[in-house]
Image: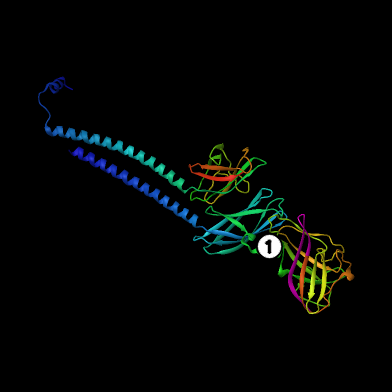
Amino acid sequence: MNPRKIWKLLHGKRGVSAVISNVILTGAVIAVSFVVLAWTQYRSSAYNDEYSEAMDADIARLKERLAFEYVFYDQSGSTLSVYLMNCGTINDTTVKTVYVTTSTGEPIEVFSSTTLRYFDGNEIPDQDLDRGEEGYFTLSSLGLSADTSYSVRVVTGRGSAFDHTFIA
Amino acid sequence: MIGTTFMVLVMMFLGTSVFLWTLSQNTLYNEAVRTTNQEEINRVNEGVIALGGNYSVSGDSVTVLAVLKNTGSVTAQLINLWVLDTNQSKYANKLVNLNLNPGDIEPVMYAVLIPETHANNTFVSWFVTARGNTVPLEREFEEGVTVAEVAQGIGYLAMDFDKFRYYEYASAYGLKDFPAGSGGYSVPATEHVVFGVKLTNYDPTGRKRSLTLNSHSLIWMYFPTYGKQVNWHIVNVDANGTVQPTYSAITVGYQETTTVYFASKSDGSFSGMNDKVKPGSGGPAAINLLLLGTIGSDEYGQNIPFVSVYCS
């Protein structure tokens, strides 16, 4: 740029007109508005996703239900067999953790890895129970006292908990 | 001013859309809760009962008889039967697929395999429905039917009236038309006959003892018209229908049913022609079943004044 013009612009006494200043201000506000819009859109979208995930998880948990068909403790082998059926309205119910407690709730053993089998003894390939599907798992080395009441709690992969009381 | 208005409108739009979206999600959740509650109500209203439970054992096979009634207000699907042999803590299950409408009554019979089981053992069983409810099977005697038959002044052994039979001889020791025989209520007066009686040991004391019949057990026929009496002592008859010359004690296990034969004039033996018995007179006659022996380690005696016959 010509140095004369630069000097004139910096040391000139005339201000910009009101129209131009309004245009500049309005443009600035609209620009900021778009930034705020984008930001709030991003935040609300993230909130929607989180809320949707939480809601879906809650709904899935609501639909889960496991029925205990039979719980049998073999004194000679110290093995607990838990026979289950998925009588809920959702597929893919997994067994994540199993707690064995006394009747007063004091923990005895926690099992975080169980193998689900069909009632004929074959392993269930996908290790979950679909709707109406039956299966069982065994817990070994428990050492429970005969004729004593215990509880078993099955926690599913979705976080639902199902309790059953049995006598060893 | 324009920018501010625009910004407010944007904020309102965003707020409204988030609110509506949240509302729709809550609606979805409420719908899921409503559906789950309805299923829970259906589960509670499922009212299947299993009555008349009876167990019979053959080898390792336990046959379960029951009458299922759906007394609830919703249909029910039975998917599994569990049978537990409490004596040896062994169990088995049988997949079933039975649908019951409200009010349906369905007699069922299922067999499960429990290794090394025995008729004297105690069994407990229950059905599982598709909704996850369990239906315990109530034993027949708990309803009072069987107990009334054997405990109210009659005794531990019960007799099956439909299976009262008589047999004529085909040879010195062989029975004619064995094992079907002929209905025992009309008997030839002048022929040698053998009576067959089907007995069941219901020992209602809860001790589940076996009952052993000794050689003094007999059928006693009495002709009121003549005051005449005829006796048939208990005998053993093999699977071919041949009466055995020597009697060896017959044991009826708890809840077992056995056909017992009465043929001999002598106590404890049967020598063919000399020991054969015939009514010898015509007309109506009363028959008493005099049973003697032991139940468990105790002595036992029972008199069943059970049928009338007509000899012709």
Q: Position of residue A137 (x, y in %)?
A: 59, 43
Q: Which residues are magenta?
A: B291-312
- Label 1 marks which chain's residue? B
Q: Would you say A61 lies left or right of A7 here?
A: right
- Magenta span contains residue B97: no
Residue B230: x percent and y percent? 82, 73
Please report the residue visible at 50 percent of the width from the left and 41 percent of the height from the top.
Answer: A157
Task: Give coordinates of residue A140: x percent, y percent.
Answer: 62, 39
Residue situated in front as seen by the camera: B310 or B3: B310
Compared with B220, B123 (above or below) is: above
> What residue is at 47 percent from the left and 53 percent from the top?
B40
Residue type (three-letter) at the residue carrying disc 1: Ala
- Image point (27%, 35%), residue name: A35
| Numbered circles on residues, count | 1
Residue picked out by circle 1: B151
Residue B202, above or below B279: above
Side (left or right) of B43 relative to B173: left
Dot 1 crowding, Cα within 10 Å, few <14, some 14–19, many 20+ = some
Q: Is residue B125 visible?
A: yes
Query: Which quadrant is home to the C terminus of chain A?
Result: top right
